[in-house]
Image: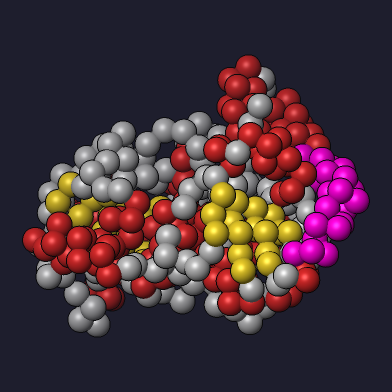
Amino acid sequence: MNIIKIKYNLREKLSKKQFYVIYTFFRFFKNLRFYFYGIINYFLLFLPNLILKNKNKYFLIFSGWGAGDLLALTSVVNYYSKKGEVVLVSSDYDVFKNFKIKKINPKNNKLLKIFLPILNCSFHSNIIGAFEIPLNINKEKIHLREALLSKRKDVCNNLFKINHNAIIKFNNKEIKSFSKKYNNIINDNYGIIIAGSYLGGLCQVKNWGIENMQKVIDRTYKDVAWIQVGTIKEPKINKSFLDLRGKTKLRELFFIVSKAKIIVTTEGLLTHLSSAFNIPCITIYSGYHYPEISSYKNVIPIQPSPLPECAYCWTSPCLLYDKPLCLKNIKVNDVLKQIKKKLDKNIL
């Protein structure tokens, strides 16, 4: 069973203290499993790795991650595609479309699906996987890319001078198609906003609230043509210029964001995506994790003030409060000040 599913099932049945102890055990067990599989991997794939190395090929296993995580890994795929031939194992290829790589979907390969956990825990030079973020991440405050590759210090050292920015590649057909479909908006100075108020995942600790996003629009809609994106499950924000919730495919969202002038979002997909196009992105960080996890030059972080002692917890749902204290300490005016600052600089 997926550890996220285990978390939410247990959270409903146990006290906060019991939940934390058991959750910590699961995280420890998963890290222990990495090294166990890594030992098997070392002996099982020693010879295949030599063959890959001799042929200058790389086998990258980035399966099971969300689009935001994969965006943080685009620079890794791009780096190795310049060094040699890359075979990418991932169930989501939209992020890596137009990269010069070969792709394998583990869902369509039963044998690969069986060996996937072992492959993902490789220590070999030409077989590289991303694993769960470690428990001690708070001590280092590293970027998501390095967090996902924390077990591979050799890879992180290779990427030391490589920019963290996400890389999105459009082909001519996409540009022509998307330009035609969204011709009514791409010539306008518009902004992108997402409520981030849907249930599930990490949202209980990241969810700043629809009411706060509505206050942002209420104060700025005359100056910014806000386009709301996200899932259809998210509540609609009134006074938005255009509602695109659940109406765009991922690649279409990439294109729309590439033409935006400003973004307001809770930390996640849009934060990483904005870095690909250097769009000013006002990102709201709760006390769940530190801003460095998605720190790009274009990102303007909004943090809780004051920051509670329990930050950065990396735990959702919150173990201490029904509504996380860190979310209560994020002020609408702080967001508005940053929007005004960008407006004054004629970014819009």
Residue located 82% across and 40% down the image: 33
Residue 233, above or below 281 = above
- Residue 79: say if magenta: no
Where residue 173 sits, quadrant-wise, is bottom left
Residue placed most toward the observer, 289 or 167: 167
Residue placed most toward the observer, 279 or 17: 279
Residue 60 visible in the picture: yes
Looking at the rendered image, the quarter that the C terminus falls into is bottom left
Q: Position of residue 342 (x, y in %)?
A: 27, 75
Indicate how the structure is coloured in the image.
Answer: secondary structure
Residue located 39% across and 58% down the image: 270
Residue located 20% across and 55% down the image: 227
Residue placed most toward the observer, 159 or 93: 93
Where residue 57 sits, quadrant-wise, is bottom right
Q: Position of residue 292 (x, y in %)?
A: 57, 66
Residue 212 visible in the picture: no
Where residue 169 sits, quadrant-wise, is bottom left
Q: In the rendered view, does 12 fall on the left or right side of 300? A: right
Q: Position of residue 273 (x, y in %)?
A: 41, 62
Looking at the rendered image, the quarter that the N terminus falls into is top right
- Region rendered in magenta: 30-52
Residue 225, above or below 320 = below
Q: Position of residue 138 (x, y in %)?
A: 69, 57
Residue 30, above or below 275 = above
Residue 237, above or below 51 = above
Q: How many marks?
A: 0
Q: In the rendered view, does 105 fall on the left or right side of 252? A: right
- Residue 41: say if magenta: yes
Q: Main secondary structure of the magenta part?
A: helix
Residue located 75% across and 29% down the image: 22
Q: In the rendered view, does 54 fall on the left or right side of 323? A: right
